[in-house]
Image (cartoon, rainbow, N blue to C red):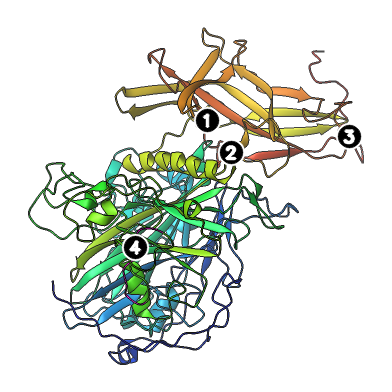
């Protein structure tokens, strides 16, 4: 396909290398476009001001309605992990500073069309709201009306659809048919906008008729579900709301329906967040040589000492610390974590009436793409086809200044258009490559085949640490392409942010652990984000007495807790049924301990267990051990087999040294889990034990606080005249 790009003269701006964003960038600057001003095609929308936190699991991060995320617009990171409770004085640490979607391509007339966001220091390329179908236009009133998120939980939809409860406010106001405020400016948009289940099939979203946001809460949708996660933020934005003032490119005319979502679990998924973008070309022209990318400014705690790299086969970009100690007050300390972005699902390849081969030496995109060699014609999706990095500097390997630099990074080139090369820091002469710092994850040399070679070209491993690069303030871009973005075409891109921290072995052990966590995320994606719930934990009511706490388990006699039963399909084994088995109660070191920390005795200790009186007692799951590189058996519970109890008293502190009696007026923290066991599975089944992910009536596991104190009834109030366990 023949395209034309016109070169421009660039003004280089001096920037500080010790800043997260680009210090010194002119706040009002609009990079010049060689094709002239695009103001005549722009509306007068204001930048998106709507912001919402995704916060159901061990991550708390901020999302904006203009599509940028993971920061606060005020030079502060907002990808907090582990999540610290509101009001806590513990230090908050972050693993990323900012991120955004990038799109760029060239039309038949040679005009370069780019939409990208970084720090809003020069302006914006995205604005809230959809685009009209007829002419890809939007007005300021429509942008303002859509300058909001719809934050929803799967639990509240389940309660409405399955539990018979009244619809929540967000279910009632869900923009299934868009926002209709009256007036011509709200006409001409798509009639179905936010995903929903149309129970009465009339094309009108109406909860009074049973319609609901598009989770698969009944089990009937499967991979046709359109809404994911235990908590979801949905919004819509576009690139036509105003002049592209951040990087100066012509608009593409895209409407992007987005959702950020997360799952509350007791495994590695509890440290992940996910993002799904439905990209619709509302313009009447095709955009050629289009790349869709994800830009990440990943700061692992202390932001000036990081490395980056990628895992080609997994389609995973990784940021990690440059040494084993992440210094400064905001750093993670010893054994710092690794943070990764996985390109689970990229856009469709251009149709060619062929089931493209799965042999990566013949079709490089098959190495981490989807649908190759599956006998289905034209269902192939491109995975991560480029991985590039740049520094927080002003040189040719630094921050982009304009739309052409953005497009060059998207297509795996430096700012001056020269190819990235294999080895060293990637700049200079040598073999062109598509994947920077792949380590040993590209043994076939797939990154080199895609740049003109016709046979596999194996290369020696290449990473930042092996070539001795100086750690720094890195950014990276992963992109998929090139494709032709046809007029009216719809493409879906799904990414996941994956995090892991090893307890020993330094920063490289965390890199290996994040790859393992990414495999869990990939399995979840391959299962269409379907996840088994497990039994709900009971609600815990704490009675506070003199140096004593009585814990009562409530809301237990229902099909979510003690009567729980659920069937899941496991590859190679078929359907597996799980039934309720018992309760586990942990004392936590602080309110900030997450459900994923329960195996760390420094943070959580088991203080109570009970289970059904049957023949099942010890339950062992198999867990992969990174050091042994093998699956090892791990005892999850050793049941007492004495029957279920729904109350207990606690008089001792599991974390105390010396005198372990509870102390009045001190806060103690507890977490209850219900667990289930698989029925009729082989004795060597890897996961007979399954803990629940939620507390009854809530969307995640709850932490409870008890404060012992002397009971002092006032004005003839009730006085407790017996001790726990008395029967008189």
Mark found first going from the N terminus, 4 or 1: 4
Q: Is residue 106 left or right of residue 171?
A: left
Name the main secondary structure of what is drawn in magenta.
Answer: loop
Mark found first going from the N terminus, 1 or 2: 2
Mark found first going from the N terminus, 3 or 4: 4
Q: Who is closer to the viewer here, 600 or 469?
A: 469
Q: Which residue is mark 1?
A: 627
CA gap, disc 1 and disc 3 = 52 Å
Mark in the foreground, 4 or 1: 4
Mark found first going from the N terminus, 1 or 3: 1
In the rendered structure, which segment of residues is drawn in magenta? 416-423
Q: Which residue is mark 4?
A: 421
Q: Which residue is mark 3?
A: 711
Q: For the image shown, how many numbered marks are present on the structure?
A: 4
CA gap, disc 4 and disc 1 = 34 Å
Mark 2 is surrounded, within 10 Å at the Cα level, by few (under 14), some (14 to 19) or many (20 or more) other residues, namely few
CA gap, disc 1 and disc 2 = 9 Å
Quadrant location of the C terminus? top right
Asked if the residues shown at circle 1 and circle 2 are in contact, with their CB atoms under 8 angstroms apart, the answer is yes
Percent of width and height locating residue 334: 66, 46
To which quarter of the image does residue 139 belong? bottom left
């Amino acid at each position: 396909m023949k395209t034309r790009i016109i070169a421009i003269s660039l003004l280089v701006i001096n920037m500080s290398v010790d800043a997260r964003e680009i210090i010194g960038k002119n706040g009002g600057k609009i990079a010049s476009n060689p094709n002239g001003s695009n103001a005549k095609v722009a509306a007068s929308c204001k930048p998106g001001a709507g912001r919402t936190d995704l916060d159901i699991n061990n991550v708390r991060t901020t999302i904006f309605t203009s599509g940028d995320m993971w920061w606060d617009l005020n030079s502060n990171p907002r990808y907090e992990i582990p999540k610290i409770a509101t009001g806590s004085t513990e230090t908050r640490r972050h693993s990323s500073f900012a991120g955004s979607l990038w799109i760029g391509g060239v039309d038949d007339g040679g005009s370069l069309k780019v939409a990208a966001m970084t720090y809003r220091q020069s302006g914006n390329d995205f604005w809230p709201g959809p685009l009209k179908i007829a002419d890809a236009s939007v007005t300021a009133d429509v942008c303002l009306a859509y300058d909001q998120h719809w934050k929803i939980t799967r639990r509240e939809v389940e309660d409405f659809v399955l539990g018979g409860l009244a619809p929540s406010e967000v279910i009632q106001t869900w923009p299934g048919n868009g926002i209709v405020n009256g007036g011509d400016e709200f006409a001409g948009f798509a009639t179905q906008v936010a995903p929903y289940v149309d129970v009465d099939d009339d094309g009108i979203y109406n909860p009074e008729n049973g319609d609901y946001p598009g989770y698969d809460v009944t089990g009937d949708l499967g991979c046709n579900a359109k809404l994911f996660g235990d908590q979801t933020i949905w919004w819509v934005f576009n690139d036509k709301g105003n002049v592209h003032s951040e990087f100066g490119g012509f608009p593409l005319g895209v409407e992007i329906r987005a959702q950020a979502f997360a799952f509350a679990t007791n495994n590695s998924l509890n440290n992940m967040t996910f993002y799904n973008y439905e990209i619709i070309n509302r313009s009447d022209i095709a955009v050629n040589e289009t790349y869709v990318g994800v830009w990440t400014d990943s700061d692992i705690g202390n932001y000036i000492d990081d490395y980056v790299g990628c895992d080609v086969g997994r389609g995973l970009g990784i940021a990690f610390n440059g040494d084993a100690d992440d210094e400064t007050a905001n750093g993670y300390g010893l054994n710092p974590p690794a943070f990764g972005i996985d390109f689970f699902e990229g856009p469709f390849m251009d149709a060619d009436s062929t089931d493209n081969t799965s042999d990566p030496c013949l079709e490089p995109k098959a190495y981490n793409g989807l649908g190759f060699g599956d006998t289905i014609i034209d269902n192939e999706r491109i995975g991560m086809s480029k991985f590039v990095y740049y520094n927080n500097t002003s040189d040719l390997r630094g921050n982009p200044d304009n739309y052409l630099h953005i497009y060059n990074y998207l297509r795996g080139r430096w700012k001056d258009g020269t190819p990235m090369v294999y080895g060293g820091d990637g700049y200079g002469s040598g073999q062109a490559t598509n994947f920077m710092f792949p380590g040993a994850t590209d043994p076939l040399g797939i990154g080199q085949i895609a740049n003109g070679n016709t046979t596999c070209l194996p290369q020696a491993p290449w990473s930042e640490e092996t070539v001795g690069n100086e750690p720094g303030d890195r950014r990276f871009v992963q992109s998929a392409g090139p494709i032709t973005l046809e007029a009216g075409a719809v493409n879906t891109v799904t990414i996941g942010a994956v995090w892991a921290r090893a307890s020993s072995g330094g920063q490289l052990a965390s890199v290996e652990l994040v790859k393992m966590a990414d495999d869990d995320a990939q399995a979840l994606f391959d299962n269409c984000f379907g996840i088994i719930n497990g039994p709900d934990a009971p609600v815990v009511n704490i009675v506070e007495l003199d140096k004593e706490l009585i814990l009562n388990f409530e809301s237990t006699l229902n099909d979510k807790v003690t009567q729980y039963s659920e069937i899941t399909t496991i590859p190679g084994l078929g359907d597996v049924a799980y039934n309720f088995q018992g309760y586990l109660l942990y004392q936590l070191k602080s309110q900030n301990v997450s459900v994923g920390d329960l195996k760390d005795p420094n943070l959580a200790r088991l203080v109570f267990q009970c289970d059904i009186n049957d023949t099942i007692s010890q339950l062992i799951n198999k867990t992969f051990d990174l050091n042994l590189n093998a699956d090892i058996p791990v005892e999850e519970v050793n049941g007492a087999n004495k029957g279920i109890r729904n109350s207990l008293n606690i008089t001792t502190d599991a974390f105390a040294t010396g005198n372990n009696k509870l102390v009045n007026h001190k806060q103690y923290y507890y977490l209850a889990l219900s667990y289930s066991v698989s029925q009729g599975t082989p004795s060597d089944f890897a996961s007979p034990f399954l803990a629940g992910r939620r507390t009854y009536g809530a969307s995640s596991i709850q932490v409870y606080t008890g404060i012992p104190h002397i009971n002092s009834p006032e004005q003839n109030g009730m006085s407790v005249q017996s001790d726990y366990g008395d029967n008189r």
